[in-house]
Amino acid sequence: MPERDFVSWNTMITGYARNGRMEEALCLFNNMPKRNVVSWNAIISGFLDNGDVKSAIEYFERMPERDAASLSALVSGLIQNGELDKAAGILLGNGGRTNGKEDLIHAYNTLIAGFAQKGKVDDARRLFDQIPFHPDCKRGDTGGVARNVVSWNSMIMCYVKIGDIFSARELFDQMMERDTFSWNTLISGYVNLSDMEEASNLFCKMPDPDTLSWNSMISGFSQMGNLVIACDFFGRMPQKNLVSWNSMISGFEKNGDCDGAIMLFIQMQAEGEKPDQHTLSSLLRVCAEAVALQLGMQIHQQVIKAVIPDIPLNNSFITMYARCGAIMQASLECMCSCWPSGGRSDAFRSMVSEFGIEARVEHYASLVDIVGRHGQIEEAIIVIKSMPFEPDKVVWGALLGACRVHNNVELARVAAEALTRLEPESSATYVLLYNIGGKLQSTSYMFNKIKSQSCSYIICKKFCQCEIKAWRGHPFVMHCSALRLNDH
């Protein structure tokens, strides 16, 4: 590099620090011909990010000139390293001096939030009261710092966390200017205390409720068992997100309305919202309560294709199968989910030899799913080849889902080819394979498969349009009616 400036030096220091290479960062810092405030802030932040509190304070005290960012970074870093008292001492004592022209309110707000996290609400309020409404007010020793909306929100959040809704409301009413976070924080405080009447009053007065505001109301009324009002809020929402759907489905589930939960899940899928672990866990509890084994098995297939199950979701599977009377499947789920990685095949064998459970195709499908999703795709293929009977669509679907998770295009094609033979009318296989490959080669492969099922296609320069002959209305062709391809 012909000429190094502050930006190049500071960028290198920051890069080394973020990668934990503080020796190299410090060497660069010491070799700089001239340093600016950003250089000092970069090395101090590096020490804090790597847990070296002592060096961070030492270099902060050596700084020839400090700005608001210097002090804010130090206070925030000390709090993250569990040094709340040191942060307070530096900010409120002489160690926090700056040139007197900087706005230090961010550092004060950070310290208020730090006190709140540690449950020191009295200390947080004491600091908050030291900060005046306006810079020209003289109160405490804050050097002309004035409260902003974040200061008020941080203090209100303190009170909401400990359930002191009266103090939170008192501050809220004193605010000269509120933002969406102010309203949502206080609404959530009333919801947490099941005071939905006051939460509703606030919601009606709120200038512009956002999705979080609507979700809080839905969750609150659902928890109280008032599904009629919860559904009314849900229906009037201008824009729903996954949390909205999950809150409503969970509300139906917790209040024993299994049909409502199932119908809402169907509506959720129809509107294109993808479920997550929370959605599926609620639905599995619904299946367990309603003894709906078939629906539970369908949800299991969705998990195989779209979600990496976690421990709570696996527990929900075990409960669902057990309550539906599928004890063998519940036993297999339990053994496979609890076994450490690499021991699942042994668990499967012990199911047969020690527990006397005859392995069926569903058991093999579960084993293929679990082994494949942990990255052992080749072992999953071995399991399929060792099956004493022909693998069905569930087995191949489990393999295809694992290939999607680990982006194994070649074995995904093997699974997809088997699935298209078993379910030629289903579009899910084609779409999933395209999502795995996402390239011209994979797209051409799928259209060749459709063509082999009495379909024809025409590829233009920019778009791929399908013309159906013997199989008019093929689902995948409808899905890909205008699929952009690369120029060739």
Image (tube, grey):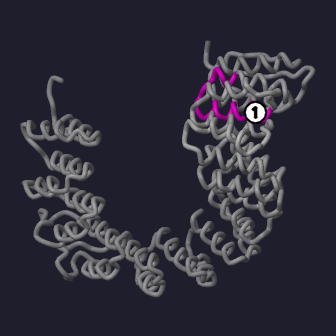
Please tell me whether residue 128 belongs to the stretch shown in magenta: no
Q: Is residue 76 left or right of residue 323?
A: left
Query: Chief secondary structure of the magenta span?
Result: helix
Where residue 200 sits: x, y (%)? 62, 79
Does 117 sit above or below residue 306? Answer: below
Pick out the residue farthest to the right. Answer: 470
Is residue 133 among what the camera can see? no
Q: Residue at x 70, y 43 (%)?
A: 354
Where residue 30 sits: x, y (%)? 9, 40
Q: Residue at x 75, y 39 (%)?
A: 363
Residue range of the region highlighted in magenta in the rendering: 393-413
Q: Quadrant of the N terminus?
A: top left
Does 65 sit above or below residue 11? Answer: below
Is residue 178 among what the camera can see? yes
Report how many numbered discs are placed on residues in the image: 1
Q: Amino acid at mark 1?
A: Val
Please tell me whether residue 409 belongs to the stretch shown in magenta: yes
Q: Is residue 86 left or right of residue 128?
A: left
Residue underneath mark 1: 395
Asked whether 279 or 399 is in front, the reply is 399
Asked whether 89 or 92 is in front, the reply is 89
Asked whether 446 or 100 is in front, the reply is 446
Does 363 sit above or below residue 266? Answer: above
Q: Is residue 104 left or right of residue 408?
A: left
Where residue 177 sits: x, y (%)? 42, 75
